[in-house]
Amino acid sequence: MDTLKVGMKDELVWEVTENLCTTRGDYKVFSTPSMTLLIEMASQQLAMPHLKPGQGQVGVSVNIRHLAPTPIGKKVRCETELVGIDRRKLTFKAKVFDDVEQVGEAEHERFIVDLDKYLARLKAKIEDAAAAG
């Protein structure tokens, strides 16, 4: 994590396939939940190589604006930038574009976690749910 620096940038490009769409009238368009996932994945991709062994990351918030529709079959590109580091909290600003225009923007926060603790907590929750069954 010591190699993460404010100002680092990355991008991720997806093709808008049917599973990423919602229907508006007669058209299938890139959905807001899919845009949120694209932003999370682009930001995760930026941070991942800089984590120490035993560390992982989780998304904790996304404040998104979906600005314009993108039809099925087009490409969308998310440009993400690391704009803040506060101990284990990472803050990203993202912009999403299609072939024509900017279609979205967001601020996204991720948190660096200790995987052993995170997975132990998850396992306990699964076991508690199974016992309550």
Image (tube, rainbow, N blue to C red):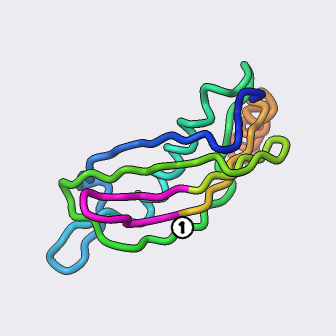
Residue at 80 percent of width and 41 percent of height: 88
Residue 33 location (% of width, % of height): 45, 62
Q: Nearer the viewer, residue 39 or 18?
A: 39
The N terminus, quarter of image: top right
Q: How many marks?
A: 1
Image quarter for residue 67?
bottom left
Q: Nearer the viewer, residue 124 or 42?
A: 42
Which structural element holds mark 1? strand
Q: Is residue 5 above or below residue 111?
A: above
Q: Give the left or right position of residue 72, taking residue 114 as reference.
A: left
Q: Is residue 47 found inside the magenta-colored segment of the image? A: no
Residue 75 location (% of width, % of height): 26, 51
User: Dot 1: few (<14), some (14–19), or many (≥20) neighbours within 10 Å?
Assistant: some
Residue at 79 percent of width and 31 percent of height: 114
Residue 81 location (% of width, % of height): 58, 48
Residue at 56 percent of width and 44 percent of height: 43
Q: Is residue 15 above or below residue 48?
A: below
Residue 128 location (% of width, % of height): 76, 44
Which segment is the magenta one?
94-105
Q: Which residue is mark 1?
A: 64
